[in-house]
Amino acid sequence: MLRIGLISDTHGLLRPQVLAFLRGSDHILHAGDICEPAVLAQLRTLAPVTAVRGNNDLGPWAQELQETETVVFGAVRIHMVHDLAELGRGWQATGVQAVVSGHSHRPRVEQRNGVLWINPGSAGPRRFKLPISAGELLVDGASVSARLVEF
């Protein structure tokens, strides 16, 4: 079984309790609005990282990030995008079992039409009264499940 850490909307802030939660991940997915390249460097000390560019990721370092990524763990395909409004078309044709997004700062796990939709929420500065959160995917062969944690 693989444990994939999920994080989004750090906006330059990595909290110690979020780092502790992500420790032990086999891979980490960051769904954008990283805002500082040091965030990715710090996450890479824990596990390999795949990240997508969010609307607040600016500058030369951010141009190296794609707006969408599809990653494969075992038999599970996961599509990443920062803002679901930018999801576009064609992603379903790739046999995706899960979509990971950010942007709204609202943590959510939902199963729709055979696809698991996950937004780990925001692990960065608190926005309004929304929780500080992150998540994990557990991949076992062709099955995937998600869990969110509030800090």
Image: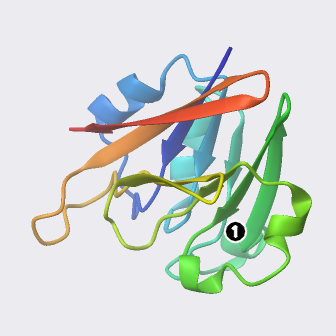
Depth check: give the residue in front, 29 or 144: 144
Depth check: give the residue in front, 137 or 95: 95
Depth check: give the residue in front, 36 or 30: 30
Kind of element beneath mark 1: helix
* Residue 50 location (% of width, % of height): 71, 48
Q: Is residue 106 above or below residue 95?
A: below
Query: Which residue sits furthest front?
Result: 113
Name the quarter where the N terminus is drawn: top right
* Residue 65 location (% of width, % of height): 74, 67
Q: Is residue 12 left or right of residue 35?
A: left
Q: Is residue 10 left or right of residue 70?
A: left
Q: Is residue 68 above or below residue 113?
A: below
Name the quarter where the C terminus is drawn: top left
* Residue 113 location (% of width, % of height): 63, 60
Q: Give the image quarter of residue 145.
A: top right
| Point 81% across, 69% down: residue | 91
* Residue 150 location (% of width, % of height): 23, 40
| Point 37% across, 73% down: residue | 104
Q: Give the image quarter of residue 130.
A: bottom left
Mark 1: give few (<14), some (14-19) or many (20+) Cα within 10 Å: few
Q: Is residue 30 left or right of residue 72?
A: left
| Point 40% across, 57% down: residue | 10
Give the residue number, with chain letter if any, for mark 1.
61
Q: Is residue 33 visible?
A: yes
Depth check: give the residue in front, 89 or 136: 89
Disc 1 marks a residue whose amino acid type is Trp
| Point 64% across, 80% down: residue | 59
Query: Which residue sits furthest right?
Result: 94
Q: Give the image quarter of residue 139.
A: top right
